[in-house]
Image (spheres, rainbow, N blue to C red):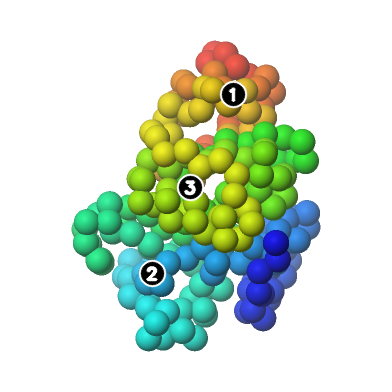
């Protein structure tokens, strides 16, 4: 299902491709699945230079909201596990900047026919991109926060890109659905959990922030 594409989003896609952050095969999914379709009514753009955030509400500032949604910058979408409106003490869910998303997808090297396990559903945008490229029966995504998972599931369904969304601890992976050709984590972690090594196929790939690991199904080969 193709969603409305703003001129700014299309321009960002061409910029990402020219910089090498996004490979050409991802452009159709980028254009068909804009990040704006997976963002809440209120989010907080994060300025990485100053470390400051500002609140943007679609209901009161729709053009500003759309502009930030189409920008190459991270957006905080939840604070303190949803206990407050925000900004709070700790951002607990966010939409990564598109440059990071597509560099990680490039490292993942997911090809048609592959089955992918995503850890950290968040807004659902990354899962939607994978589903658009691979198909709904090829993507399983895990989110530990039930409210975040429900919101993502609803957005994926609305876009016609709903695969399988599980609510559980992502460190445990999905043993019932294993083995997977690719595993990608969008949440930060210190080390690759052993469960993922057991659930990725031989010569499979695990991609996580700060680490790219080609792994067999045995931990010693991680």
Measured from the top left, where is residue 182 in percent x and y? 63, 33
> Which residue has dot 3 on it?
121
**Picture quadrant of residue 25:** bottom right
Residue at x 42%, y 79% (from the top left corner)? 58
Which disc, if any, is residue 43? Answer: 2
In this rendered view, identify the residue nearer to me: 48 or 192. Answer: 192
**Picture quadrant of residue 53:** bottom left
Residue at x 51%, y 63% (from the top left corner)? 38
The C terminus - image quarter: top right
Instruction: Say whether disc 1 or disc 2 marks the residue closer to the N-terminus.
Output: 2
- Vertical placement of residue 4 versus 203, above or below: below
Q: Are marks 3 and 1 in contact (CB under 8 Å)?
A: no
Badge 2 crowding class, 10 Å Cα cut-off, few under 14, some 14 to 19, many 20 or more, is many
Residue at x 59%, y 23% (from the top left corner)? 178
Q: Are marks 3 and 2 in contact (CB under 8 Å)?
A: no
> Which residue has dot 1 on it?
178
Q: Secondary structure at mark 3?
A: loop
The answer to whether residue 92 is left or right of residue 134 is left
Measured from the top left, where is residue 43 in percent x and y? 38, 69
> Label 3 vs label 1: CA separation?
18 Å
Measured from the top left, where is residue 191 in percent x and y? 43, 30
Residue at x 46%, y 84% (from the top left corner)? 62
Instruction: Say whether disc 3 or disc 1 marks the residue closer to the N-terminus.
Output: 3
Instruction: Say whether disc 3 or disc 2 marks the residue closer to the N-terminus.
Output: 2
Q: Secondary structure at mark 1?
A: loop
Badge 3 crowding class, 10 Å Cα cut-off, few under 14, some 14 to 19, many 20 or more, is many
- Vertical placement of residue 155 versus 189, above or below: below
């Amino acid at each position: 299902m193709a969603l409305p594409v703003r001129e700014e989003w299309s321009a960002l896609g061409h910029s990402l491709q020219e910089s090498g952050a996004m490979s050409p095969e991802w452009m159709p999914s980028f254009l068909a699945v804009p990040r704006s379709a997976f963002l809440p009514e209120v989010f907080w753009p994060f300025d990485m230079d100053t470390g400051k955030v500002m609140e943007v509400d679609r209901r009161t500032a729709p053009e500003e909201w759309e502009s930030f949604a189409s920008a190459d910058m991270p957006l905080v979408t939840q604070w303190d596990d949803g206990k407050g409106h925000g900004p709070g003490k700790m951002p607990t869910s966010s939409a990564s900047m598109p440059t990071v998303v597509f560099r990680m997808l490039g490292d993942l090297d997911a090809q048609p026919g592959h089955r992918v396990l995503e850890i950290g559903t968040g807004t659902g945008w990354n899962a939607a991109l994978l589903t658009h490229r691979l198909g709904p029966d090829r993507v399983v995504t895990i989110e530990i926060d039930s409210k975040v998972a429900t919101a993502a599931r609803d957005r994926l369904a609305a876009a016609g890109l709903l695969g399988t969304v599980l609510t559980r601890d992502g460190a445990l992976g999905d043993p019932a659905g294993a083995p997977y050709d690719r595993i990608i984590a969008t949440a930060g972690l210190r080390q690759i959990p052993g469960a993922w090594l057991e659930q990725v196929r031989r010569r499979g790939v695990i991609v996580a922030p700060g680490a790219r690991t080609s792994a067999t199904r045995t931990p010693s080969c991680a």
